[in-house]
Amino acid sequence: MNAIEVRQLTRAFAKKGGGQISAVDAVSLDVAQGTVCGLLGPDGAGKSTLLKLLVGHLRPTSGSATVLGQSVAHLDSALWSRLGYVSQQHYLPAWMTAAECLRYARAFRPQWDEGKVRRLVERLELPLDVRIRNLTHGHYVRLQIVLALAHNPELILLDEPTSGLDPGGRHELLAMLIEEMAPDSGRTVVFSSHLVEDIERMADSVAIMDAGRVVTSGLLDTVKGSRSRVEFSSPIPEADLSALPGLISFKRATTVNVAVTSEPDHALQYLRSHGAADASVVSASLEQVFFDYVNRRQE
Amino acid sequence: MIRAIISKEWHQHRSRYLFYWIAVHAPMLILCLVIAFSTGARTPFADLSDALTMKYLPLSLIETLLVTTIFLLLTAYLAVATFGPEVDDRSLFFFYEQPVSRKLYLSTKLAYGACHVVLANSSAILLMPVAVYMMMLISGKVTSAGSAAAFGLVMAAAGRAAIWCTLISLAGFSLSALLSALVPRWWLAAICAIVLMLVLIPNVAEYVNYLPDIAGDSMSIGMNVSTNNTQWITISRPVTNAELAAFAPWRVGPLFSLILLSAACAASTAFLYSRKQL
């Protein structure tokens, strides 16, 4: 069963000079219940817009999506008791203290876990008596995370939670999130980031977004396996290379040539038959796959 | 849930609401202070007696004029300040992220603000004659037995005027709240709301006119405030019972229009704010 189902979802904004630009362009995506899905993409890829559409903070231009069985076009406010959301934007009420903010949110959620809140506040060293406007970015994010986790929601949407954090803070936050999202919790998590390392550490499945579109999605290993790097040092004429089976991109480095292909076995065979006896398949990292998808569009 | 929203509203806007309450009660407070500390200010009461209660006591109804003119501008500002800043700093979306319907949240906000407007204005209008009457009684020149009827008439007029004025204020409040949903920056919306009130006050005054028709030359009120002056306020003659009874009469059309306008603006405000996007 899917916690999130997105079908041809589009959100267009008016451009300054006239016309429209699609921040999310005909996106289709399924997120299975109880999994951690990483939304990976460069800045401006449409990850935040997609998450805002899923929580009802934006209305779609076209297409449809359901979150925990509810259509985002008619989102019931009661859904927020099953949902936790960490936004990249700062919009917690600046005039409240962190404690007041938590108290306010608690008033609406009978399932609020005060013990968990105390534990998280202590672990994240969150200052409760400081006004939100005076919180550092790190503390602000931590408060958002406490708010998102306090009521043990079924679905958590995290929009670049580690963005802007120092390496120590990022590491600690990710470790905490991984603990909270233990596989046996049955919780579904959608985690957006432009940091491949974060996605690789947390996600079971990944959707790579670029220019408002989901360019590929699936289980982490499947996505990684969709691209293979074939490395060889022997010089091969350009004309022969263009016929390499499944060729996606080719880069000539000083000592080694790298061909990215979707058919590694055939490519290997082909290269060897064309004189590249040292050709070998190297499994691609998610980062390489990500850059391949993103760079291909830019080219 | 509603209690949490109200408590949050109070914490968020308490200084604004406190200022509003003090401002609308300021005429009464100033009057009490001036009379308490300045002998010159007490001069108009020099000829005070049971028979002349009706000469001075109706002056306390001046508060109704203030509520529907100067303080209406303050009401407009209050309405915009209740809603606008939450959109400007986007904190509205944090409140939308609670499992309570957007419409309920917005209705509670509107109702809470409207309650302050209604209570502050009606209390200012009703307390003014009470305060003035108390001062008259304390002076010893007026007896409760001899002036009770006049006080009753003035209070009845103040009661009717309180309904008129609170409905006018409510319409101003909800109209300004609606404006705050339409104008992008809250400070800009506040300026627009105040300008709108300035335009509406003279133009709508004819329609919602609740003042009695008193021939201009039959009564005059003069004011000359100075320390050397012996009489700060001069009134040519007392208000007649008939004139007081004609003050703020029940006129279904304008009263109903004000209720309708308030309800329509409040509903539109809630609708527009509930459609806001991040």
Image (cartoon, grey):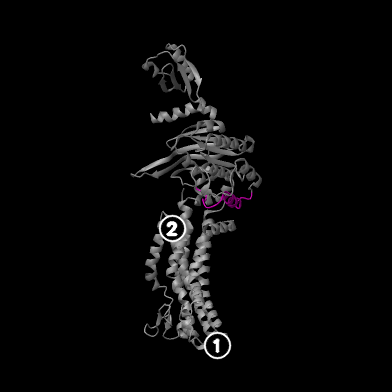
Q: Note whether B258 is above or below A123 in the view shown.
A: below
Q: Is residue A11 left or right of residue A113?
A: left
Residue A162 seen in the figure: yes
Residue B252 seen in the figure: no
The residue depicted at 53 percent of the width and 77 percent of the height is B131
- What residue does disc 1 label? B146
Is residue B125 on the magenta stretch? no
Of labels 1 and 2, the one closer to you: 1
Give B158 or A234, whichever is nearer the viewer.
B158
- Helix or strand or loop: what does disc 2 sit on? helix
Numbered mark located on residue B180 in the image: 2
Is residue A99 on the magenta stretch? yes
The mark nearer the N terminus, 1 or 2, is: 1
What is the chain identity of the residue bearing mark 2? Answer: B
Give A255 or A230, whichever is nearer the viewer.
A255
Q: Note whether A246 is above or below B246 in the view shown.
A: above
Amino acid at pointer 1: Gly
Cα separation, mark 1 vs mark 2, equals 51 Å
Residue A257: x percent and y percent?
A: 43, 18
Amino acid at pointer 2: Ser
Give B249 or A164, whichever is nearer the viewer.
A164
How many numbered marks are there?
Answer: 2
User: Which residue is outermost to the left?
Assistant: A17
- Magenta part of the chain: A91-110
The residue depicted at 52 percent of the width and 87 percent of the height is B50
For the residues bearing labels 1 and 2, Cβ distance under 8 angstroms: no
What is the chain identity of the residue bearing mark 1? Answer: B
- Helix or strand or loop: what does disc 1 sit on? helix
Numbered mark located on residue B34 in the image: none
